[in-house]
Image (cartoon, rainbow, N blue to C red):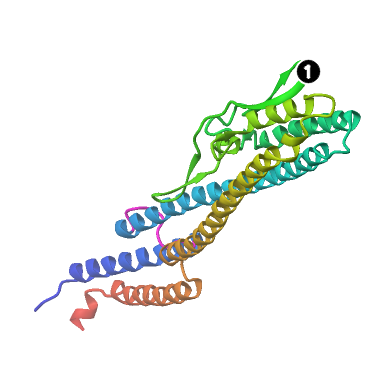
Amino acid sequence: MRVSSNVTYNDFIKNLNRNAVKVQKTLNQLASLKEVSQSSDNPLLVSKIMNLNVALGQNATYAQEIKDSISWSDTQDGALSSVGESMARIRTLIQASGTATAGKDEINANKNEIQQEMRSLVDSLNTNFDGRYVFAGQATNKIPFEVIETNGEVTGIKYNGTGHNLPREISDGVTIDLVTDGSKMMEADGEDLSTFFNDVMTALNAGEDGDKEALSGELMERLDKFSSNFVDNRTHIGAVANRLKSAGARNETEKISLTQSLSDRQDVDIAEKYMEYQNQMLGYQTTMAMGTKIMQTTILDYVR
């Protein structure tokens, strides 16, 4: 079969261009350190890379949500710790007022301090995190608790928030409720905290020396129920915080896995890619050398 010079030249040019494209592609990969730079390079691979980038973006969003929720729960725990201290002090003062030796002056002093502790308790329950009130239900921009005053005396507490917890999505399809329903802080065994404090003030104001029987008996029992309720809510918040920390650990593991998968598909192995480049350059240079010999062929080479 006779092969014309034109066919030889065309094959040479075709092979030279093919090798040049390979070399240029590898040079681009080495320069960018990425396997692909545009979707036409490898549509399937680009699609997988885009999906991984979306997954990493969602992972980062969930990580921030978890971090924010943990800080929120830690703020709540600190607030309820202060509430517990106030309740313990109020208990001590009520107990002291219920003793037989407590006179009018002592009871008045205790009453004034109890009112201050009630204000302190409200301040603790009105704690906010990043400008949002942590015990306001879903109305996080509204101060949830306020003291009720009668004739200049603090006689109770009013809750102005909503009766809902605050849901947070911490992973795909997984939601956790932050304990934000402040109305749960106001109830214990069907009793209202505001009513209890009003009854305490009534007992302290009764007669010359107060209602000793109420102060040393049923009011102490009722206070213990409310104190236990605050402890129960704090325990619930601690359980939520533990779950959030576990979710945070899983989120970090997922991030590492996604990052590794993305790197495996997107990033080049520099050493391997450089060896590939050297082999391609060798092939390109060999093609150029053979082309030089082909291009030097003239009609005289066929008539010798």
From the viewer's side, name the closer residue of 97 and 173: 97
Q: Is residue 41 above or below residue 154?
A: below
Q: Position of residue 126 (x, y in %)?
A: 67, 33
How many circles with numbers are drawn on the protein? 1
Q: Position of residue 55 (x, y in %)?
A: 42, 53
Magenta-tinted stretch: 33-41
- Residue 98 is left or right of residue 36, and the answer is right
Q: Is residue 276 above or below residue 84?
A: below
From the viewer's side, name the closer residue of 231 and 196: 196
Residue drawn at x 78%, y 18% is 152
Residue at the extreme bottom of the image, as rendered: 304
Residue at the extreme top of the image, as rendered: 151
Residue drawn at x 37%, y 54% is 51
From the viewer's side, name the closer residue of 57 and 126: 126
Q: Is residue 179 above or below residue 211?
A: below
Magenta stretch encompasses residue 135: no
Q: Main secondary structure of the magenta part?
A: loop
Residue at the extreme left of the image, as rendered: 1
Q: Is residue 238 above or below residue 303?
A: above
- Residue 29 is left or right of residue 198, and the answer is left
- State the residue position of label 1: 152
Q: Give the position of the C terminus as an image quadrant.
A: bottom left
**What amino acid is at disc 1?**
Gly
Q: Give the position of the N terminus as an image quadrant.
A: bottom left
From the viewer's side, name the closer residue of 201 and 271: 201
Task: Identify the image quadrant of residue 288.
Answer: bottom left
Q: Position of residue 240 (x, y in %)?
A: 54, 52
Disc 1 is placed on an element classified as loop
